[in-house]
Amino acid sequence: QVQLVESGGGLVQPGGSLRLSCAASGSIFSMYAMDWYRQAPGKQRELVASIASGGSTTYADPVKGRFSISRANVKNTVYLQMNSLKPEDTAVYYCNANYYTPFGRQDYWGQGTQVTVSS
């Protein structure tokens, strides 16, 4: 079992920056791949960025070059640095921890944090 708590969301002007944090507890953090998802009103939840247990990263096309995901295993925390924010980045951002078992993928979710980009 993993418990995830996101923080760092808020209201920011276009072109601004925010850093989201996701603190994990309850299991061996370093064994999990960590993802950030987002869900805008009326839209499906979408994957934004991923960081594997070994540290490799991937990004969705809309955020490439603007967002950066990182992890600090000693702090059981994953971060999402968001720069050059746009109004279309407005969404609830969710942290996800996942790993694969012989029976399939196991997922854990945080409660989400609101990011609003507006002037």
Image: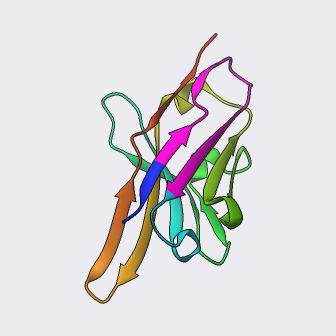
Direction from residue 93 to residue 109 in the image, left or right:
left
Camera-nearest residue between 8 and 91: 8
**Residue occupying image coordinates x 52% and y 42%:** 6
Per the picture, the main secondary structure of the magenta-coloured stretch is: strand
Residue 8 within the segment the image draws in magenta: yes
Residue 20 in the image, given as x and y percentages of width and height: 62, 40
Give the farthest residue toward the left: 103
Residue 91 in the image, given as x and y percentages of width and height: 46, 31
Judging from the image, the colouring scheme is rainbow
Instruction: From this view, report whether residue 24 is shown above or below residue 111.
Output: below
Give the farthest residue toward the bottom: 102
Quadrant for residue 69, please give it.
bottom right
Image mark count: 0
Give the farthest residue toward the top: 119
Residue 111 within the segment the image draws in magenta: no
Instruction: From this view, report whether residue 42 is shown above or below residue 74.
Output: above
Direction from residue 102 to residue 88 in the image, left or right:
right
Instruction: From this view, report whether residue 23 is shown above or below residue 71.
Output: above
Quadrant for residue 30, please give it.
bottom right
**Residue occupying image coordinates x 61% and y 60%:** 76
Quadrant for residue 15, please give it.
top right
Residue 116 in the image, given as x and y percentages of width and height: 54, 22
Camera-nearest residue between 67 and 70: 70
**Residue occupying image coordinates x 67% and y 72%:** 56
Camera-nearest residue between 37 and 77: 77
The residue segment tinted magenta is 5-24
Direction from residue 81 to residue 36 in the image, left or right:
left
Question: Is the N terminus in the top left, top right, bottom left or bottom right quadrant?
Answer: bottom left
